[in-house]
Structures are given as C-alpha cells and as structure tokens.
Amino acid sequence: MRLTTLCCALAWTGTQGLWAQTDVVVQWMDEEGSPACQFPDAGHTLHVSAWIDGVTQTAIQAEDLVVDSTGTCLWPDAASGVYTLEALPWSWTMVIEPQAEVDTVTLIWPSRPFQRLRKNPSKVRYAEGHPGAAVDSLQLWLSQQLDSLDLDQLMASGAVGANSAQSAAAREALARALERGNQEIAARLTLAPHTLWGDLMASLVREWQMSLGATEDLAALRAWEGSVEARSWKDRLASPGWCSSWELQHDQWWDVLEEARRPWRSWVAMGDVDSLCQATGWTLDELHVAMWMGQGQAWSRWADSWWDLRWKDQCDVAGIRRESDQARRYVLTGQAWGDVMWMMPNGDLEPAWAGEGDWRVWLITRSGSASGTREWSILRSWMANQAPKDVSWGVLSVDANEEGWSSTLAQREQIRERIRWVGRDPGWWDRLDVSRVPQVVVVRPDGEVHTHHASLPSEGLFAELKRWRLTVR
C-alpha cells in the first residue's frame, strides 16, 4: 500500500482522536475559483462515502451534501475519519480530525479530461498552516530528493550496468542523503504522531528511507514517534497511514522464515496460529493484521485460506475485518437495492427492487451510448420472441441529468417496458458495481444478484441465462 496519490488529495480538519466531530465548510470550485456547480455535468450534490478501514480502503456511502449557487455547503458534525466525496466522474479524499472551530476545505473541479467513468482523483486545497499543507510540503521535499538521486538508486540496486566501484559510490551517496535528510525531516515532522495525519507523515518518510536503502527508521522518525502506540486496533486500522507504515516496517516479513526453511505457507493455509506466533513473536491480533495485508501479496491464496479458517477468531482485528467484509458484501446484494430510490417514468421516486420470482435482466445504459442502444434492441427482440416465461428484463439509466434521462426514456418502444433512472449516485453505482456502460446485471428468482457483470446480449448473455436456469437452484 503506497499513499503518495492519497496524500496529494487529502484535506485537514483538526488534530484530535478518532470519532470526535466538527463542522466542515466545503467550497466546491473550478481551477479559476468559480463555483463548480456552474458546469452542467457537475450538478449541486457531493456524495460522501466513509472509509471502512485503511487496509481495503473501501468506502461506503454515508450522506449527501448539497452546495448552493456559490458552490458552498456546511457539513455539520463530521466525524473523524477518512472520506471520499464524489461528483462523478471526479472524487476527492479527505481526512477529518476535528478541532474546536469550524474548518474550511476547497474541492477543485478539474479542467483536464477524465480517464474513467468514476474515481478520477482530484485536488483538495486548504490554507497554509493546516496539517495537510505540512504533509504536502514534506511529500514534495521527499520527492525532490528522490528525483535528484535517481541514477544513484539504479546503480546501487544493480538495475543499470555499473562496476563495483560505481555501485559502492552510489550506495555512499544514498547513505549521505539519508544522513542529511535526517535533520531536514526532523524539522518537518511538525504534526502530532499517532494521528491520522501523523501516520501519513510517518508512512511517507518510511517509503522514502526504504527507497534509499535504509533498513531501519531514521533517528528523527524514531524520536518523533517516541511515545508508545496507545490507540485501539480499531483506530489504528482506520488510518491508511498506519496501515501503510505497518506494511513498510514488515516488508517481506516471511523472508526470515523462508531462509530458516520454516513451512510458513503451510502454517498460513492451515490456520496454524501457534506455529506462526512462535516463529514471528506476534500476538493473535498482529497475526491477523499480517494475514489481512497478505491479500495484496503474491501469496494471497494462502491468506484467503487463513481467513476461511480463522474468521471466527475472538480478537479485535478479526472482529474489525468481519465488520468490513460484511459491509462490503452487503452493498452488492439485491437486498441493498431497497435502501435507495429510483425514478419511475412518471417522475415518482420509489424504493428500488431488484426483482423476485423470475430471472431479471437489467441493462445499464445512458443517453448517447450507441452500444447501449444496440444492446437494448437485441435484448428487446430476444425477450419478445425467444425468452422463457421465467425471464423478465428492465433498463437502468445512469444519465447525469433530466435531459439525458428524457432522451433514454424516449427510446422505449412500448410504455410497458420497465425503465428506471438511477443517475450518477455513487450509492447506486456501488450496488450495480458499474465498470462500463452498457453493462448487464442478472438477478435470480430468490431476489439475489447472480452477477453484476453478465455478458452483453450480443456477446453471449442468452446462452449464459440458459445455463444458469438449469444449474442454479
């Protein structure tokens, strides 16, 4: 886990512990300082999602903020944590650590083209003196130092051709850079350690020192962190900086076990707690952290086996992971559709319903999508002439505005065609797991989503449906 991109986007709102609250004034502007809501594609709504944990960095939608004509809104009683604010296709990531007074952050609506349908990161701007500015300053300095040492890093690592004398000289240059950097970093570590923002500072320094070949923390970092970590596992795992630091501090922790020819993979796959704890010196909680982090490693299949066997363990970290898994799974269920609304063709808002009693095919499309129009036509024809009686269908519009919705609605050939408008609400996009348009979601007769990514009608959907109807009970 590397937080360089995250740090560029984060905003600050204070310095106290997790779960406190503060009021946040959000200003939503373009790069010239004009209200972002002046752009038709922007709208007036910012969708807020709260990060579940710093390991998976999964965000679950929490609330909506509506900006006024000046691009400003008040976010009252914002709890400490990490948040993603979205106005598709852009997103902004914020850290909130409350303080006494109201804080103000500015979200920038960029002018550059976006690369994806969703989660294109954009900048959060804050005033000088905020911890976010301190983190940005530290990150910039560290990046400049690395850039000036590019060749030395390559020669020291053997990535480019170099004789032994050149490699030794490169390693010496990196060592001198670490020594010089220690004093500068000591002056830049101005935030309180063991906080959300302090954790980000620590992870940036650790990533930098590791890039220069350090095998232990700089003296400045050790002195700054000094005090014993007193936060709960919940608070630590809620911090992406802490999670990143843990990975950096325990990078390739299994190498020592492999050198000693210890069968650590077998221990992991079999859930052998005693052997792993004895070999690593970790507690059960620390072991669960390592296994959770292992999901992103080459040995992730063994980490998955561990969790299949040990998910009921009665320790703090296992409990936190269970809650995280449950929240991430729930949003993808058919039941979760009932928590959100969609618009009917007559303009009424109604609770959504995935379907029940038959196989339901939902085609996700939008106005202006030529491929969406083509797939709609193919699906309509098949449903009218070849579909079994236990298969029904509908269309979900992800149009950004009423004009697009009206255009999509006009594509119906019959008023009986089931069509709903879900728009660009990230809560809906989470439930549909939208990754492209058009896209097909299939719901089983029991009301559960069978797949969010079925083949398109032109690419084999009907053969898949035939197979599922025969094999799924």
Image: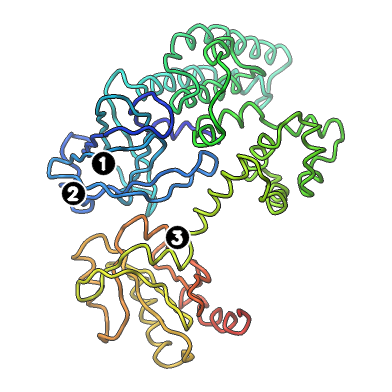
Q: Residue at x 60, y 30 (%)?
A: 246
Left or right: 247 in relation to 124:
right
Q: Mark 2 points at which residue?
A: 39
Q: Pinpoint residue 440: horizontal percent, then vertical percent.
A: 44, 71
| Quarter occupied by the C terminus | bottom right
Q: Residue at x 48, y 47 (%)?
A: 58
Judge by depth and name the residue closer to the eye, 204 or 60: 60
Instruction: Give the residue drawn at x 41%, y 37%.
Output: 82
Mark 2 or 3, which is nearer the eye? 3
Quick one: SS at disc 3? loop
Question: Left or right of 132: which side holds 218?
Answer: right
Q: How far apart are marks 2 and 3 (CA)?
A: 26 Å
Amino acid type of the residue that numbered disc 3 sits on in the rendered structure: Asp
- Mark 1 and mark 3 residues within 8 Å of each other at the beta carbon: no
Helix, strand or loop at mark 1: strand
Instruction: Give yes or no for contact between labels 2 and 3 (Cβ–Cβ under 8 Å).
Output: no
- Image position of 38 (left or right of 381): left
Instruction: State if disc 2 and disc 1 touch (CB < 8 Å).
Output: yes
Quarter of image, res 289: top right
Which residue position holds label 3?
A: 433
Give the residue at x 38% y 32%. Answer: 20
- Measured as percent of width and height from the top left, residue 19 is found at 41, 35
Viewer-nearest residue: 397 or 15:
15
- Against 132, is 319 above or below? below
Sequence-earlier tag: 1 or 3: 1
The crowd level at tag 1 (other Cα within 10 Å; few <14, some 14-19, many 20+) is many
